[in-house]
Image: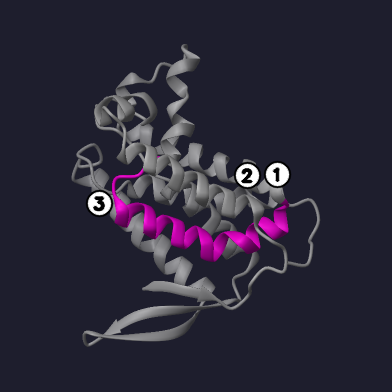
Amino acid sequence: MFPIRDSRTSRKFPFVNLGLIIFTIYIFVQELFAPDLDLFIANYALIPQNVNFLLLGTLKPFITSLFLHAGFLHILSNMWFLWIFGDNVEALMGHFKYFVFYIFCGVTASFVQYIFIADSSLPMIGASGAIAGVLGAYLRFFPRNTVDTLIPVFGLPFIIAVPAGFMLIYWFITQAFNGVASILVATASTGGIAYIAHTAGFSGGYLFCRYFVWSKKPV
């Protein structure tokens, strides 16, 4: 299932959400044209075996890695999900708290993934964990919204209005299933999609989003 639009567009301009998208794209362009891509990745990606909690400098990639991406499909899919689901969450939380929430979910997702692959030399990059947190918050606050979703039926594309709660729970279950599978078959450190980070980001967003909303506001 691929979301096209949600049924509830925020009445407040999503300054932070749009800013995150623009900044992430800017960093991706810098990544594409970096004179030494390996050095760029080594400096800003989260490489688990380089983490030392006694050295603050080695913790910086828990944040900087959120703005790196592995390719055009990776960044386009991430930014599309953020554009669709982030505006309502930002409107409810407020601009500053939404920004803090986004970083919090990203760091939480990366840290949980790190626990399982602490000895890995493979770089972890991408905003997926942070965006998963936004999806978790959307599920908690707007489960009755509908999402126009592209669904292939017998090879033909159909756009169907799906309850947001159903779509996001389905997304979470698939991520959790793949995350558990990656642990059971000991492939969590072999690269690819960080399903554990996705699951952790979504869970963290769902559980802690209420602490970023001091009062219910119309969005």
The residue carrying mark 2 is: 99
Nearer-the-camera pick, 173 or 62: 62
Name the residue type under label 1. Answer: Phe
Q: Position of residue 130 (x, y in %)?
A: 49, 47
Location of residue 47 with respect to 24 vertically, above or below: above
- Residue 191 inside the magenta-drawn segment: no
Residue segment shown in magenta? 68-94
CB-based contact (under 8 Å), mark 1 and mark 2: yes
Nearer-the-camera pick, 24 or 65: 24
Disc 3/disc 2 C-alpha distance (Å):
32 Å
Tell me if mark 2 has few (under 14), some (14-19) or many (20+) residues whose alpha carbon lies within 10 angstroms of its own.
some
Q: Position of residue 129 (x, y in %)?
A: 44, 47
> What is the total number of numbered labels drawn onto the structure image?
3
Dot label at residue 181:
3
Nearer-the-camera pick, 81 or 25: 25
**Residue beneath the point at 53% across and 72% down:** 165
Outermost residue, top side = 54
The residue carrying mark 1 is: 96
Q: Position of residue 32 (x, y in %)?
A: 31, 41
Is residue 91 visible from the viewing direction of this image? yes
Specify which label sits upstream in the sequence, 1 or 3.
Answer: 1
Q: Quadrant of the C terminus?
A: bottom right
